[in-house]
Amino acid sequence: MILRVAIVASVVLTAGQAMAEPMNADVARRFVAGKMFAYNCFDGTRGAGRIYGDGSVAGTIQIRGNGPVRFVTLPAGTLRIKGQAYCASLRGLPFEPCFNLNRSDERSFRGAVSGLNFAYCDFTRGNSRPMMTRTSWHMRSASPLSLQANAAATAEIKN
Protein backbone atom coordinates (compact mmCIF):
# COMPACT_ATOMS: atom_id res chain seq x y z
CA MET A 1 0.00 0.00 0.00
CA ILE A 2 2.87 2.40 0.75
CA LEU A 3 4.14 1.90 -2.79
CA ARG A 4 0.71 2.74 -4.21
CA VAL A 5 0.44 5.83 -1.99
CA ALA A 6 3.89 6.98 -3.03
CA ILE A 7 3.13 6.42 -6.68
CA VAL A 8 -0.07 8.40 -6.35
CA ALA A 9 1.75 11.13 -4.43
CA SER A 10 4.54 11.16 -6.96
CA VAL A 11 2.10 11.16 -9.80
CA VAL A 12 0.59 14.24 -8.19
CA LEU A 13 3.73 15.87 -9.51
CA THR A 14 3.51 14.20 -12.89
CA ALA A 15 1.34 14.37 -15.96
CA GLY A 16 0.42 12.13 -18.89
CA GLN A 17 0.58 12.74 -22.59
CA ALA A 18 -2.81 14.39 -23.10
CA MET A 19 -2.90 17.67 -25.02
CA ALA A 20 -1.02 19.47 -22.29
CA GLU A 21 1.99 21.58 -21.47
CA PRO A 22 4.94 19.57 -20.10
CA MET A 23 6.24 20.77 -16.74
CA ASN A 24 9.82 20.42 -15.60
CA ALA A 25 10.50 19.79 -11.92
CA ASP A 26 10.81 23.48 -10.94
CA VAL A 27 7.57 24.46 -12.69
CA ALA A 28 5.79 21.45 -11.17
CA ARG A 29 6.96 22.33 -7.68
CA ARG A 30 5.62 25.89 -8.01
CA PHE A 31 2.34 24.61 -9.48
CA VAL A 32 1.74 21.94 -6.82
CA ALA A 33 3.55 22.73 -3.56
CA GLY A 34 1.24 23.47 -0.66
CA LYS A 35 -1.96 23.23 -2.70
CA MET A 36 -4.80 20.75 -2.25
CA PHE A 37 -5.50 18.40 -5.17
CA ALA A 38 -8.16 15.75 -5.74
CA TYR A 39 -7.00 12.87 -7.92
CA ASN A 40 -8.45 10.00 -9.96
CA CYS A 41 -6.18 7.30 -11.35
CA PHE A 42 -6.35 4.86 -14.26
CA ASP A 43 -7.16 1.91 -11.95
CA GLY A 44 -9.97 3.70 -10.05
CA THR A 45 -7.79 4.76 -7.11
CA ARG A 46 -8.83 8.20 -5.88
CA GLY A 47 -8.33 10.65 -3.08
CA ALA A 48 -7.11 14.11 -2.20
CA GLY A 49 -3.93 15.46 -0.74
CA ARG A 50 -1.26 18.07 -0.45
CA ILE A 51 2.43 17.91 -1.35
CA TYR A 52 4.63 20.21 0.68
CA GLY A 53 7.76 22.05 -0.42
CA ASP A 54 9.95 19.66 1.60
CA GLY A 55 8.71 16.65 -0.43
CA SER A 56 6.38 15.34 2.27
CA VAL A 57 2.80 14.33 1.47
CA ALA A 58 -0.44 14.20 3.46
CA GLY A 59 -3.84 13.13 2.19
CA THR A 60 -6.37 10.40 1.60
CA ILE A 61 -6.40 7.38 -0.68
CA GLN A 62 -9.06 4.87 -1.64
CA ILE A 63 -7.50 1.96 -3.51
CA ARG A 64 -9.30 1.07 -6.77
CA GLY A 65 -12.21 3.31 -5.75
CA ASN A 66 -13.70 0.97 -3.15
CA GLY A 67 -12.95 -0.07 0.38
CA PRO A 68 -11.92 2.23 3.17
CA VAL A 69 -10.59 5.72 2.61
CA ARG A 70 -7.27 5.96 4.42
CA PHE A 71 -5.37 9.00 5.63
CA VAL A 72 -1.68 8.71 4.79
CA THR A 73 1.45 10.76 5.27
CA LEU A 74 4.87 10.38 3.68
CA PRO A 75 7.93 12.02 5.26
CA ALA A 76 9.98 14.95 4.03
CA GLY A 77 12.21 14.01 1.12
CA THR A 78 9.86 11.37 -0.27
CA LEU A 79 9.40 13.41 -3.43
CA ARG A 80 12.54 14.99 -4.83
CA ILE A 81 14.01 16.54 -7.92
CA LYS A 82 16.49 14.40 -9.83
CA GLY A 83 17.83 16.36 -12.80
CA GLN A 84 14.70 17.83 -14.41
CA ALA A 85 12.39 15.05 -13.18
CA TYR A 86 10.31 14.55 -10.07
CA CYS A 87 11.03 11.21 -8.44
CA ALA A 88 9.89 9.27 -5.36
CA SER A 89 12.20 7.76 -2.79
CA LEU A 90 10.38 4.95 -1.03
CA ARG A 91 11.66 2.64 1.65
CA GLY A 92 11.48 -0.96 0.46
CA LEU A 93 11.32 -0.06 -3.24
CA PRO A 94 14.49 -1.09 -5.09
CA PHE A 95 14.29 1.84 -7.54
CA GLU A 96 13.23 5.50 -7.59
CA PRO A 97 10.27 5.94 -9.95
CA CYS A 98 10.25 9.26 -11.80
CA PHE A 99 7.29 10.97 -13.43
CA ASN A 100 6.19 12.79 -16.57
CA LEU A 101 4.35 16.01 -15.74
CA ASN A 102 1.84 17.69 -18.06
CA ARG A 103 -0.30 20.65 -17.10
CA SER A 104 -3.82 20.37 -18.53
CA ASP A 105 -5.06 23.85 -17.55
CA GLU A 106 -4.60 26.44 -14.79
CA ARG A 107 -6.06 24.05 -12.17
CA SER A 108 -5.19 20.53 -13.31
CA PHE A 109 -2.50 18.21 -14.58
CA ARG A 110 -1.89 14.57 -15.40
CA GLY A 111 0.95 12.57 -13.93
CA ALA A 112 2.35 9.31 -15.32
CA VAL A 113 5.16 7.03 -14.27
CA SER A 114 8.04 7.55 -16.74
CA GLY A 115 8.01 4.75 -19.29
CA LEU A 116 4.54 3.59 -18.17
CA ASN A 117 2.23 6.24 -19.62
CA PHE A 118 -0.80 4.00 -19.03
CA ALA A 119 -0.15 4.36 -15.26
CA TYR A 120 -1.45 7.88 -14.69
CA CYS A 121 -3.53 10.01 -12.35
CA ASP A 122 -5.46 13.18 -13.15
CA PHE A 123 -5.23 15.93 -10.53
CA THR A 124 -7.51 18.91 -10.04
CA ARG A 125 -6.77 21.73 -7.62
CA GLY A 126 -9.47 22.23 -5.03
CA ASN A 127 -10.03 24.28 -1.93
CA SER A 128 -7.05 25.03 0.25
CA ARG A 129 -8.91 23.54 3.22
CA PRO A 130 -10.58 20.13 3.25
CA MET A 131 -14.33 20.28 3.39
CA MET A 132 -15.88 19.08 6.61
CA THR A 133 -19.05 17.08 6.11
CA ARG A 134 -21.62 15.63 8.42
CA THR A 135 -22.98 12.24 7.48
CA SER A 136 -26.19 12.44 9.50
CA TRP A 137 -28.25 15.00 11.34
CA HIS A 138 -30.25 14.20 14.46
CA MET A 139 -32.86 16.41 16.05
CA ARG A 140 -32.27 16.70 19.76
CA SER A 141 -34.90 17.64 22.24
CA ALA A 142 -34.36 20.73 24.35
CA SER A 143 -35.78 18.88 27.38
CA PRO A 144 -33.54 16.80 29.66
CA LEU A 145 -33.14 13.10 28.95
CA SER A 146 -35.13 10.90 31.36
CA LEU A 147 -33.73 7.56 32.49
CA GLN A 148 -36.00 4.69 33.42
CA ALA A 149 -34.82 1.29 34.59
CA ASN A 150 -36.47 -1.74 33.03
CA ALA A 151 -38.32 -4.31 35.18
CA ALA A 152 -35.52 -6.94 35.07
CA ALA A 153 -32.90 -4.47 36.26
CA THR A 154 -35.17 -3.25 39.05
CA ALA A 155 -35.82 -6.83 40.24
CA GLU A 156 -32.09 -7.63 40.20
CA ILE A 157 -31.30 -4.59 42.33
CA LYS A 158 -33.89 -5.62 44.97
CA ASN A 159 -32.43 -9.13 45.29
Image: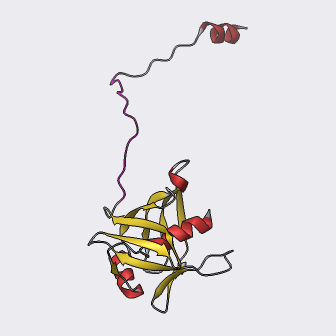
User: Which part of the image, by quadrant, shows the C terminus?
Assistant: top right
What residue sits 34% from the left and 81% below the top? 30
Percent coordinates x, y for residue 139 in the rendering: 34, 27
| Residue range highlighted in magenta | 130-143
What residue sits 40% from the left and 65% below the top? 122
Percent coordinates x, y for residue 6 in the rendering: 55, 70
Q: Is residue 127 magenta?
A: no
Q: Nearer the viewer, residue 2 or 153?
A: 2
Looking at the image, the residue that sits furthest to the left is: 106
What residue sits 58% from the left and 10% below the top? 150
Residue 53 position by quadrant = bottom left
What residue sits 66% from the left and 76% below the top? 93
Percent coordinates x, y for residue 79 in the rendering: 51, 79
Residue 15 position by quadrant = bottom left
| Predominant SS of the magenta segment | loop
Percent coordinates x, y for residue 20 in the rendering: 32, 76
Residue 1 position by quadrant = bottom right
Left or right: 5 in relation to 85: right
Looking at the image, the residue that sits furthest to the right is: 159
Q: Is residue 17 above or below residue 128?
A: below
Q: Is residue 135 magenta?
A: yes
**Count of marks placed on residues:** 0
Q: Is residue 93 above or below residue 60?
A: below
Q: Is residue 65 above or below residue 107?
A: above
